[in-house]
Every structure is written in C-alpha cells, then in structure tokens.
Image: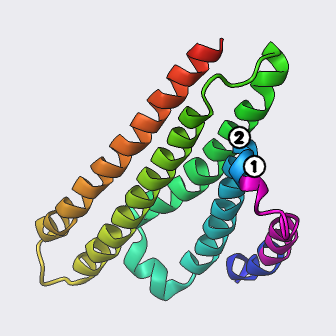
Amino acid sequence: VQSVMMIIPVVAFSLNQHLTIKGHFGALRSSPTLRFILFGAVMYTLASLQGSLEALRSLNAVTHFTHFTVAHAHLGMYGFVSMVIFGGVYFVMPRVLGVQWPRPTLTAWHFWLVCGGFAVYLVTLSVGGILQGLVLLDPARPFMDSVAVTMPWLKGRTVGGAMMTLGHLVFAWHFALMV
C-alpha cells in the first residue's frame, strides 16, 4: 500500500520539476546540460511510477526475479543518476577549465547514442522479462523454456548496451580533447 501511495508525492514532485521547463523547450537545442538533466528527470519519474506499479501483486508475480527487474534498476540508476551526472559534467567542466567543449557535435552524438541505446536496452529487457515471468509462472514448462524465451531479447540488450558504450567512448574522447 505504501509503495502504491508513493505515486502521490512522485506525481507532485514530477509535475513541479517538469513544469519548470514549460515554455523553454527551445533551450534543449542549445544546452547539453539541460538535455541530459531533463532526460534524467523524465527517467526518475518513470522509474518511480514503475516502482509503485511493481508493488501490485499481479504485476509483481510476473516480473519478480526476471530481466524486467534489471530493466527497472537501470531505469533509475542509469536513466536518472548517470544522465544527471553527465549533465553536471557538461555544465561544470567549462567553468573549471575555463574553456568551452571543443566539439558540440560530439556532445550531441553522446546524447543520442546513449538515449537510443538505453531505449533499446530498456524495452528489450522489459519485454523479455515479462515473457520470462509468464513462462516461469507455468508449472508445466521446464525452467530452460524461460531461458530460451529471453535469448532474442538479450541480443537486443547487447545492441543497446553497445550503443551506450559507443556513446561513452565518444564522451571520453570529447573529454580528453577538452582537457
């Protein structure tokens, strides 16, 4: 009950957070910091709402101990925490070093590679986890069926993870160029 009731403060906080950018969406084109932090804020909202929904017994029975749980953890830790940290680095480094980021195009590449890769990663793990959970709930099916049903989805996870890694390498290269 408490987890489901968390929807109320999450919605209140998220509305406050997201409405602060109302009328300023054009700034997303020119501010990499804002782009990363807004993405992280949206992921915080989704992770929090998904966490409340996972407390429902009907959903939890299917998703618990599956790849869906892994997707949920990444939604919070990577989607929120990492993206906000990247936004912070893009904001702080020019002020610390006294120079601008040398190639803004690399910042855009970083953002879109990690966003695209994260979307693929999240969707494939979520769908694969739900399918895995449905197989695990069927006592007539052997455990290995739950492994087999996730294999194509884990390949998708690999593609998403590779895109995210490429984005991180772009960031590292850009950071090295700046320093």
Overall secondary structure of the magenta section: helix
Q: Position of residue 90 (x, y in %)?
A: 71, 33
Q: Residue at x 43, y 42 (%)?
A: 164
Magenta region? 11-28
Q: Residue at x 51, y 62 (%)?
A: 72
Image quadrant where residue 151 sits = bottom left
Residue nearer the viewer, 162 or 67 = 162
Image height check: is 32 above or below 55?
above
Q: Residue at x 45, y 63 (%)?
A: 69
Residue nearer the viewer, 87 or 48 = 87
- For label 1, count other residues whose C-alpha is less than 10 Å away and answer few (under 14), some (14-19) or many (20+): many
Q: Position of residue 14 (x, y in %)?
A: 79, 70
Residue 175 magenta: no
Screen quadrant of the C terminus: top right
- For label 2, count other residues whose C-alpha is less than 10 Å away and answer few (under 14), some (14-19) or many (20+): many
What kind of colouring is applied to the model shown?
A: rainbow
Label ID, residue 87: 2
- The amino acid type of the residue labelled 1 equals Leu
Q: In the image, is 179 to the left or to the right of 11?
A: left
Residue 66 shows in this picture: no
Q: In the image, is 53 to the left or to the right of 24?
A: left
Question: Callout 2: helix, strand or loop?
Answer: helix
Who comes first in sequence, dot 1 or dot 2? 1
Question: Callout 1: helix, strand or loop?
Answer: helix
- The amino acid type of the residue labelled 2 equals Gly
What residue occupies the far top of the structure in this picture?
179
Q: Which residue is mark 1?
A: 34
Q: CA distance from mark 1 to mark 2?
A: 7 Å
